[in-house]
Amino acid sequence: MSTQKKLYLTGEAEELDAFWTTQQTWLESRGYMLRPRYRPGGGPNKEKVQDGKLRKHTTMDATKISDGFPVIMKILCHSKDSSELELRLNVLFSTEPLASNPKNHCVKVLEVLEVPDYEDLVLLVMPRLRIYNDPPFQTIGEGLHFIHQLFEGIDFLHDNRIAHRNIHHGNVMMDPSELYPDGFHPLNISQNKDSTGPAKHFTRTQKPPRYFLIDFGRSGIYDPSCTTQGTPAPGAQTAPEFRDSNTKLYDPIRTDIYHVGELIRQTFFMNYEGFSFLNPLVTKMIQESPQSRPTIKECILEFDALVASLSEGKIRGRAAPRHESLIPAGFVKSIIHRARVISDILRNTPVIYSPNAAQKSSNLSK
């Protein structure tokens, strides 16, 4: 049995594909339905190439039969230390009193399913989320709203003596339920659920989303008073402290700060105009020396001070893509954006993130 478990957890896409197919009948009895190709008699499907990415990551999309709620399932193996820790942390974050903490931006576990005939395997059932930066940010305020929640989520982890240790663009998601009320295709997310046309959606300003951190398989619990306690984890080795191959111990909390700063730099500085006012903060976060980097609470205080100096016009201003040609694309999109802003104001749509919100955030972080 252990050979079978290793076969599909570390094997090729086809082997993982076979696992999900064999589990469909059982999953249906537990109230979940996979896509048609995984049901008995489902047969081949043109989605096979796209499916491979999900299967290799040991995750699968599904739907709750009772209400059509979209979920994602992730295979975890108890015998792997990283999976055991991931299961423990996810359940901890999804249980009171932490579950209702407003700073908790960890993905919620809806259910843990024991896989029949595989005593070592469980499926984590979670809401189906969407990558944080799709669709693109339209305004400066939408970007600030995201950064605020990212900081808040890291603050929650660090308050609970947990370092994420694997913060990158693939591990930050958002709840798309209000942004995409009609849903979208689980693989080709730019398409509607039936993949017959573009998925319709609101702007973030119209329907502000909540952002989430996922993947705690490389996380760790640490003593904040000790600055050298973590061993390097795969995925956490892009920080300057890992350029020395002999690095044995490091400060995982400060490394989290580096990766958050890098995420902001890559997402906004490299892709959008208008965020240069954040450069002093981000520069501090990605300093070479870990001990020179600010704590997450210091990041929040400086971020909120920077936001407090902005006008509403700046916050509603367009987050123009870098290297966008001024004519005709940039000019036309600027006109469309101004029309959207006027419409939002006439409809009394509030600015998505404001100096007042920043002030409240600073008070909470103290």
Image: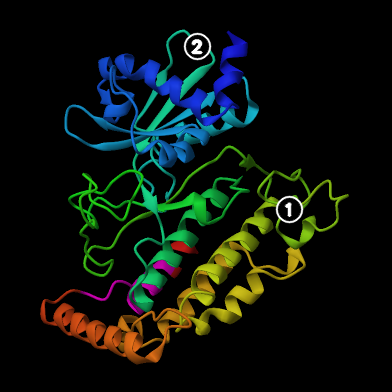
Q: Is residue 319 above or below residue 299?
A: below
Identify the residue under disc 2. 118
> What is the secondary structure assignment of the residue under circle 2?
loop
Q: Specify whether residue 98 is in view.
A: no
Q: Secondary structure at mark 1?
A: loop
**Magenta residues, as a range?**
350-361
Closer to the camera in the image, 223 or 337: 337
| Residue depicted at x 76% and y 43% | 231
- Numbered label attached to residue 251: 1
Front-most of residues 77 and 45: 45
Give the percent coordinates (x, y) of residue 14. Answer: 49, 26
Is residue 21 shown above or below 334? Answer: above
Task: Indicate the position of residue 102 as horizontal and vertical percent values.
Answer: 37, 52
Which of 362 and 164 lies nearest the eye of the viewer?
164
Q: Position of residue 354 (x, y in %)?
A: 33, 76
Corner quadrant of residue 285: bottom right
User: Does residue 212 show up magenta in the picture?
Assistant: no
The mark that comes first in sequence, 1 or 2, is 2
